[in-house]
Image (cartoon, helix red, strand yellow):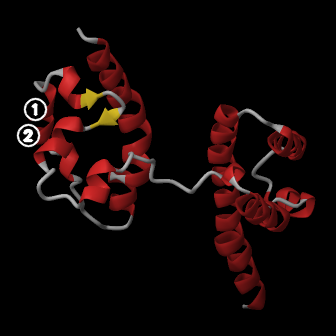
Amino acid sequence: RHVLDKAQYTWIKTMLECQILNWGGDRVDMANSMESRPAFLDHYVAEVAKVIPPDLRIKGNTEKWVLREAMKHILPEVLYKREKFAFMAPPAHTSDHKKQAIQLLINRFLSTKKVAEAGIFNQERLKKFLVDYEHDQDPVSLVRKDALLNHILGLHILHEQFIEAKAGQLAII
């Protein structure tokens, strides 16, 4: 097998099955009584993709190359030429403005008091992570830490909106 086939198989069996479908697919949809069918998960599309030669799936650094070429006459030129990027919160370490914005969120949602009240994370380990994050200069490491920080903040924001708010409502009753 080609190395790309092996890599894509591994991705399907790990990231797609274990994470992406759980967070942004089946389980989230079912929990909200929704039904969705992402186009690229259609088994007919998958069967066609399986027989596309590896050098047409990724050409140079362009993923889904054959799909882009097939849609070249339909896509606006700016989209056709645009580099692919992940659908996630932008990395906070890439500009001073973003660093300031993430620091405001950290101050609001990850204060010692908030972390202790929520009881989600180990206070000392989180503090160490934030210090390491602040002093890290490695772009690759920072991308990973940004993703983790976004998840940590997300949990604390949800905790405030739904757990703390609910407790406040119950206290009124």
Dots 2 and 1: beta carbons under 8 Å? yes
Judging from the image, what secondary structure is the residue with disc 1 in?
helix
Q: Which of the 4 image quarters holds residue 113?
A: bottom right
Residue 74 on image: x %, y %: 13, 59
Q: In the drawing, what numbered circle is on residue 156?
A: none
Q: Check disc 2 and give the amino acid type.
A: Tyr
Q: Residue at x 45, y 48 (%)?
A: 86
> Label 1 is placed on what type of residue?
Glu
Mark 2–mark 1 distance (CA, rounded to whole Å): 5 Å
Closer to us: 52 or 18: 52
Quarter of the figure with residue 58: top left
Q: Residue furthest top?
A: 1
In the picture, the disc for residue 44 is 2
Say few, some or many: other residues with alpha carbon within 10 Å of mark 1 (under 14 / 14 to 19 / 20 or more): few
165 or 110: which is nearer to us? 110
Q: Residue at x 72, y 70 (%)?
A: 160
Residue positioned 31% across, 25% down in the render: 8
Residue 106, quarter of picture: bottom right
Q: Is residue 59 positioned above or below 81 on the image?
A: above
Q: Which mark is residue 47?
A: 1
Q: Position of residue 18 (x, y in %)?
A: 42, 36
| Secondary structure of the residue carrying numbered label 2 | helix
